Image (cartoon, rainbow, N blue to C red):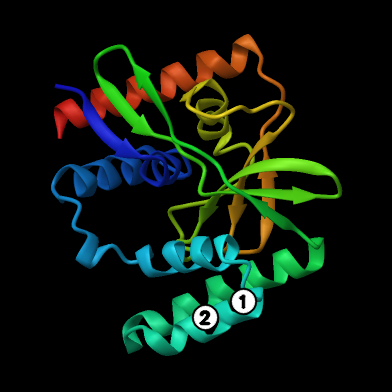
Amino acid sequence: MAIELSLTQFLTYSSKVSTSAKINYIRQVKNSEYDPSVDYWKKLRDEIKKTHEKNLPIEDLLELPKRVSEKKAKNYQRAVTKYVSFIRKNNASYFPVGKSFWSYSDDLFVRTSPEIGLTIDGKNFLVKNYYKKKDTNTKVTKRNIGSTLTMMQLSEKDFAVDSSEFSVLNLQNGGLITAKPLMSESVLELELEAQNFVNIWNKV
């Protein structure tokens, strides 16, 4: 039976700075089950999508931290502020996206759907937002998440890509990290990263 992951889980794994951090993270993922009621960022993901789909003022998102638990409020405030600032600064406009997935042999299945489509300066970006707060074991850089961006490019999709660029919006700092053109080396790196994940999963 294939291991099933979200794109955020694979991205977080890829951005771990050491083997021990990767092992600990995989152990954590393996020993937990998804439950929407305890999905930390679900309310923000849903609110961002609703705000764009209903063409509401982007500033409305700034009210969300007041409607979540006190434990979440500070992290929600940080992520919302970065997101709203990014949209304003780039005068970004929204377009809807579809579903996608990527699989590695019969061992790994990753749900890779972008969260939103954004048009900036006439260019279309298929965007995955990364919400998690900073920690010393994780660095979300273009180098570290290259395999995640490659995965997004190679995924099976139910929507047209055309000239859109696959990207991760890092809400730790408000930076947009965009995929490089696909090369054989990038594909190899992704396959090795995926195999590494499977190997660790089977051992912990």
Identify which amino acid the numbered label 1 is placed on. Thr
Q: Position of residue 30 (x, y in %)?
A: 17, 42
Q: Which mark is residue 8?
A: none
Crowding near the residue tagged with mark 1, few <14, some 14–19, many ≥20 C-alpha atoms within 10 Å: some
Q: Which mark is residue 81?
A: 1
Check disc 2 and give the amino acid type: Gln
Q: Nearer the viewer, residue 159 or 66?
A: 159
The x, y position of residue 109, in whole percent, is 30, 26
Quarter-of-image position of residue 9: top left
Query: Left or right: 70 with respect to 178?
Result: left
Q: Where, quadrant-wise, is the C terminus in this rendering?
A: top left
The answer to whether 145 is drawn above or below residue 196 in the figure is below
Residue 163 vertical position relative to residue 128 in the rendered view, above or below: above
- Which residue is painted at 52% across and 86% down in the image? 63
Under circle 2, the secondary element is helix
Q: Position of residue 153 (x, y in %)?
A: 57, 25
Q: Is residue 35 left or right of residue 118?
A: left
Dot 2 alpha-carbon crowd within 10 angstroms: few under 14, some 14 to 19, many 20 or more: some
Q: Residue at x 45, y 76 (%)?
A: 75
Q: In the displayed orientation, state which residue is furthest to the front.
A: 54
In the rendered image, the quadrant that contains the N terminus is top left
Q: Do the numbered discs 1 and 2 sit on residues whose CB atoms are within 8 Å? A: yes
Marks 1/2: CA–CA distance: 6 Å
Give residue 180's quadrant in the image. top right
The residue to which callout 2 is attached is 77
Residue nearest the viewer, comparing 87 with 94 = 94
Give the image location of residue 143, x and y in percent: 62, 36
In the image, taking residue 203 as reference, residue 23 lies left or right, namely: right
Secondary structure beneath dot 1 equals: helix
Q: Indicate whether 44 appears above or below 20.
A: below
- What residue is rendered at 26% in x and 24% in y? 198
Q: Nearer the viewer, residue 76 or 95?
A: 95
